[in-house]
Image: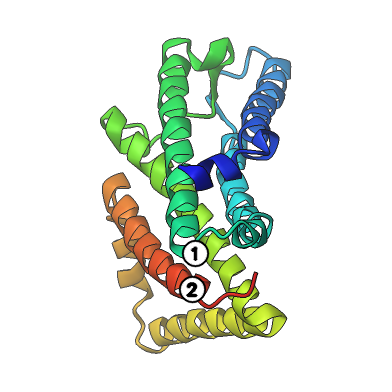
């Protein structure tokens, strides 16, 4: 709890900015929809609602690089810092996910905010029960946060050299997978596998990735230099 309070000292960064991002993205999208002639009856989509999710990637980086050195100066254990930080942002992700579900319901009830616009209730994500959309939003934000947090721990532990090796390794793995699918002529099977995924299965894969990133970032943080 003390680590969470420490992270929230700068409430503007961790609470104010996400609120502005959501409100600003909605306002701009609605203004664009309203300018489109009424004769256009097809639904209009905006991906601007994802902006706050990508901000979680930034929060994952900032939560470590900006606060970790201060926490060590205050004699906070690395274990408490880790669990306090991850727990706080899991809670923030829960609140925002709930907000997205509510906004999606309002969007459907008001015929796309009166202008036939879609920003929070995308097909495939919102076609099923409400909790499926909630889980997708929650896991997306936690995954992006953990990617940022993990990358920041790598930087703190091995500085620029570690980051260069990390991203070269990631690129090499991706290239190897692409080459394998090409040589074995497996692209049709790969495409079929992707089309068979549901919101819950995608969330499950995201959760598994989060577990791996969480374990890696925790072990790295134990040896990281403030």
Q: Is residue 127 visible?
A: yes
Q: CA distance from mark 1 to mark 2?
A: 6 Å
Residue beneath label 2, please? 222
Residue that appears at 50% across and 57% down: 81
The numbered mark, 1 or 2, whose residue comes first in the sequence reads 1
Q: Foreground residue, 163 or 76?
A: 76
Q: In the rendered picture of this protein, how many numbered marks are placed on residues?
A: 2
Q: Foreground residue, 30 or 23?
A: 23
Q: Secondary structure at mark 1?
A: helix
Q: Residue furthest front?
A: 75
Residue that appears at 64% across and 12% down: 38
Q: Residues within 10 Å of mark 1 (few under 14, many from 20)?
A: some
Q: Position of residue 136 (x, y in %)?
A: 37, 43
Whether tag 1 and tag 2 are in contact, CB under 8 A, the answer is yes
Q: Is residue 121 visible?
A: no
Q: Quadrant of residue 25?
A: top right
Q: Position of residue 19 (x, y in %)?
A: 62, 28
Figure quadrant of the N terminus: top left
Residue that appears at 36% across and 83% down: 185
Figure quadrant of the C terminus: bottom right
Residue beneath label 1, please? 78
Q: Quadrant of residue 41?
A: top right
Q: Secondary structure at mark 2?
A: loop
Q: Quadrant of residue 138?
A: top left
Q: Is residue 160 left or right of residue 182?
A: right
Q: Foreground residue, 79 or 220?
A: 79
Q: Is residue 219 left or right of residue 52?
A: left
Note whether 162 is above or below 88 in the view shown: below
Q: Position of residue 214 (x, y in %)?
A: 41, 64
Residue that appears at 59% across and 53% down: 57
């Amino acid at each position: 709890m003390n680590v969470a309070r420490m992270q929230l000292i700068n409430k503007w960064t961790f609470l104010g900015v996400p609120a502005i991002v959501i409100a600003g993205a909605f306002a701009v999208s609605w203004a664009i929809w309203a300018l489109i002639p009424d004769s256009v009856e097809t639904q209009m989509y905006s991906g601007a609602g994802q902006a706050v999710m990508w901000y979680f990637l930034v929060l994952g980086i900032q939560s470590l690089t900006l606060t970790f050195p201060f926490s060590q100066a205050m004699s906070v254990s690395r274990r408490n810092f880790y669990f306090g930080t991850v727990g706080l942002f899991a809670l923030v992700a829960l609140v925002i996910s709930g907000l997205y579900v509510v906004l999606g319901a309002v969007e459907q009830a008001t015929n796309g905010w009166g202008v036939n616009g879609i920003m929070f209730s995308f097909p495939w994500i919102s076609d099923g029960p409400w909790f499926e959309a909630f889980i997708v939003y929650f896991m997306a934000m936690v995954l992006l946060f953990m990617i940022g947090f993990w990358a920041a721990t790598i930087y703190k532990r091995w500085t620029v050299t570690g980051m260069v090796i990390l991203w070269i390794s990631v690129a090499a793995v991706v290239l190897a997978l692409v080459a394998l699918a090409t040589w074995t002529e497996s692209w049709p099977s790969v495409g079929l596998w992707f089309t068979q995924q549901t919101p819950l299965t995608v969330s499950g894969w995201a959760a598994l990735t989060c577990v791996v990133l969480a374990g890696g970032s925790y072990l790295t943080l134990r040896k990281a230099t403030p």
